[in-house]
Image (tube, rainbow, N blue to C red):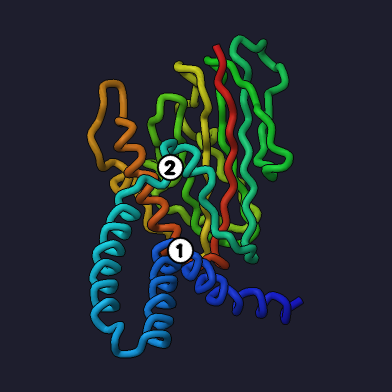
Amino acid sequence: MADSRTTEVASTPLRAIIERLQHPVLLFSLGIALVIVSGFQLFGEQANLGVGALLLVFAAGLGVFALMETRRPTGTDPGKRLSALGPGVSGPLHVRLWLDAEAAGAAAGSRSIRIEAAPEAQAKTNLLRIGSLVRFNVSVSHNCHLTLVNIGTDGNLALLFPNERHGDNRVRAGETVSIPDDAHAFRFRLAPPPGIDRVKAIVSLDPVRITAADLSGGQDAPGGRSRAGTARAVEVIEREARRLDPARWAEAHVEFEVTP
């Protein structure tokens, strides 16, 4: 078991190199380089002028292409981008995410609804009504750092953990973190508008530098964060995730539909 784990971790840099080699800009550059080399071999020094012109065209085209790639949005829906974010490598760390919901208007003592994160192949649409009370729960396999974020049906992004009561985001193996927990003097009640609600848990063996201040950039819209502001907040999370060692972090997410 130890040998297979060592091999998996060691192969991480190689996987990263392969992923970078598949980037469109690099593939385009390699293609042009092959054309230039072939031109030299076929035409020799007589092709110098043509190759020089080709290099200028290539440099200009590559610059424009790179600029477009940089400015191109990675997705029109910040919630889908957040859900899709993952390390791409299976490491030793595992996280379990679930939510408990008490249906709107439920009688005292009635059974609550539980929604757990599941593989995409088993994913299904979970329905909760506006007015339901919800609690988010996370447990981890190793001592680590937890960041829990939510994009609600209104497009607002909220940092659920760490928070004002729990500024330290270190969690212990086997410990269940509940947001809100029994000590909190508040509960989360699902509010309009109807739509898809997403919750993402990011856990890392190394410190994670995502704070409420980091996610509060952007212009506020009446009633909450603007869509552009939420997109920028998701970009902050994506940048921090790329900084982490893929073998040392994990994620889980749940999606559910809020209905009238």
Query: Which residue type does callout 2 highlight?
Result: Gly
Foreground pick, 59 / 245: 59
Label 2, on which residue?
Answer: 75
Q: Judge the density around disc 1: few (<14), some (14-19), many (≥20) Cα neighbours within 10 Å.
A: few
Above or below — where is 180 with respect to 247? above
User: Where residue 63 sits: x, y (%)?
Assistant: 26, 63
Between 53 and 95, the one nearer to me in the picture: 53
Quarter-of-image position of residue 102:
top right
Extreme-bottom residue of the structure: 45
Query: Residue 222 location, x and y as percent?
Result: 26, 21
Q: Position of residue 233 (x, y in %)?
A: 35, 44
Looking at the image, which is closer to me, 74 or 249?
Answer: 74
**Could you tell me which quadrant the C terminus lies in?**
top right
Q: Which residue is the site of mark 1?
A: 23
Left or right of 225? Residue 127 is: right
The residue at the point 23 percent across, 80 percent down is 49
Quadrant for the N terminus in the image: bottom right
CA distance for labels 2 and 1: 17 Å
What residue lies at 53% left-to-right and 46% top-to-bottom? 84
Q: What kind of residue is marked 1? A: His
Q: Residue at x 27, y 84 (%)?
A: 48
Q: Secondary structure at mark 1?
A: loop
